[in-house]
Every structure is written in C-alpha cells, then in structure tokens.
Amino acid sequence: MIGLVVVSHSRKLAEGVAELAGQMAPSVRIVPSGGDGTGGLGTDYVAVGEAIARADSGSGVVVLFDLGSAKMVADMAAEEAEGSVVVVDAPLVEGAVAAAVRAQGGAGLAEVAAAASGVAPTSVVDGDVVRAEVELTNSVGLHARPAALVARALDRLDASVHVRFGDESADAKSVLALMGLGAPGGARVEVVASGADAAEAVRRVEELAARRFDE
C-alpha cells in the first residue's frame, strides 16, 4: 500500500494533517515531519528522509508539503530515498485526505499522486447508465469525511460515477471534486453511474446516505 509523508514548517500542523487523513484511511501509513528538529519552525532534511523510510512499505511514497522551502527539502530527501517517491505540489490538507483515501483503496503510486493534486482520471467506463436522486441526510453534506466515505466505497468498482448538484458535476471517486460541489446537508444530488458495476455504485451511495454517512 502506498504511504504518505506530510512535510510542514510546523510540527503541530504536520501531525494534525496526518491525524485527519488517517481518520479517512486507517490502513495507510501517514507519517508527519514538521519543524526544524529543535522545536522551532522550519524543516529538517534528515527527519523528512526518515519519515519517507517509515512510510514506505515497499509500494512507494507520496510526499506533500506546505511552503516553498519545504518542497526543496522534500525533493532532496526523495532523491536520496531507496524506494519510489513522488513529491506532489497540492493543497496540504485536501491533498493529504484525497491521497490517503485513494491509497486506502489500493491505488498505485501514480494514481495516489494524481488524487492529491486533484487530477481527474482519464478513463471512461462504457455501459448502461444508472441514475438516482439522493438526499444528503447528514448535517454537513459532502464535506471531508462523507466525501471520503463515498470515494472509498466506489474506488474498486468497474464504473464511472458522477455526482451532480445544481449546475456542477464531480467525479465521485475524487474527494476533492466532491467537496468542491459545496453540497450541504439536506440537499438533493443526482448520482449518475455507468459501467459493469453501475447499479452497485449507486446502491452504495444510497446506502451511505441512508445511514447519514456514519455521522
């Protein structure tokens, strides 16, 4: 399984982002690396390298960072790492959550990196279209945790799934895209799926809504 490293100038920020992403993907190794190593703000090249080593289970590691100099340190540590490491320029919190959810689903290194940066998949699954109108029965709507639950539920299905709210449409396997819809609690969205597992995909979204997205 792909591991993640969160690099920040602040130790508390790195730990907080790792904790949040870990709630969405409990099986993924998410290692924070924050601060300058002496308790101050900054980044520590050695610490980042050690974090990459701890996060790598043999499948590869995606590294996210907060500010410019953190990227330089992350790039240097990635170059020296023994395994496959990709440093992704993405929103730290949203990117970490999206990447963690994708990794939890068993995606490969390129897919996890793409999820972090919000890149939509290019493949399209053909087949009959299944549609359903679903009420967001929870209080927060498609916020981080509900969006992550939907993406995880659909990740391995052979289906292309989109959620529509108003004039907007989002890839239902992308946490960032779902959150970008801004669909609040109580809203009604349309779930549109195609492919061999289209009916199962719609059923899973309906089931999550029925149990209030485990809120």
Image (cartoon, helix red, strand yellow):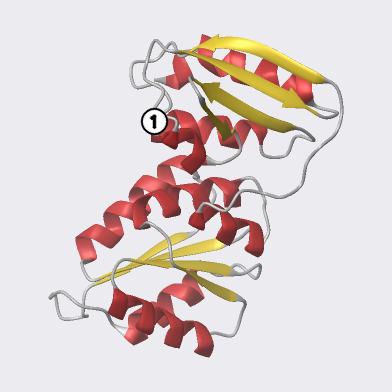
Residue 105 rendering spot, x and y as whole percentages: 64, 45
Q: How many marks?
A: 1
Q: Residue at x 47, y 20 (%)?
A: 213
Q: Residue at x 43, y 36 (%)?
A: 180
Name the kind of residue labelled 1 in the image. His
Residue furthest to the front: 167
Q: Residue at x 41, y 79 (%)?
A: 74
Residue 13 rendering spot, x and y as whole percentages: 24, 59
Quarter of the image with the C terminus is top left
The image quarter in which residue 187 lies: top left
Residue 136 rendering spot, x and y as whole percentages: 46, 14
Left or right of residue 65, residue 9 in this image? left
Q: Residues within 10 Å of mark 1 (few under 14, many from 20)?
A: some
Left or right of residue 145, residue 152 in this image? right
Q: Nearer the viewer, residue 54 or 103?
A: 103
Residue furthest to the left: 40
**Position above or below: 96 against 42:** above
For mark 1, give the secondary structure. Answer: loop
Q: Nearer the viewer, residue 30 or 207?
A: 207
Quarter of the image with the N terminus is bottom right
Q: Nearer the viewer, residue 211 or 191?
A: 191
Residue bearing the label numbered 1: 143
Q: Nearer the viewer, residue 44 or 96?
A: 96
The image quarter in which residue 132 lies: top right
Left or right of residue 137, residue 119 in this image? right
**Position above or below: 206 against 40:** above
**Position above or below: 44 against 181:** below
Q: Residue at x 56, y 70 (%)?
A: 56
Residue 120 rendering spot, x and y as whole percentages: 61, 48
**Position above or below: 62 against 74:** above
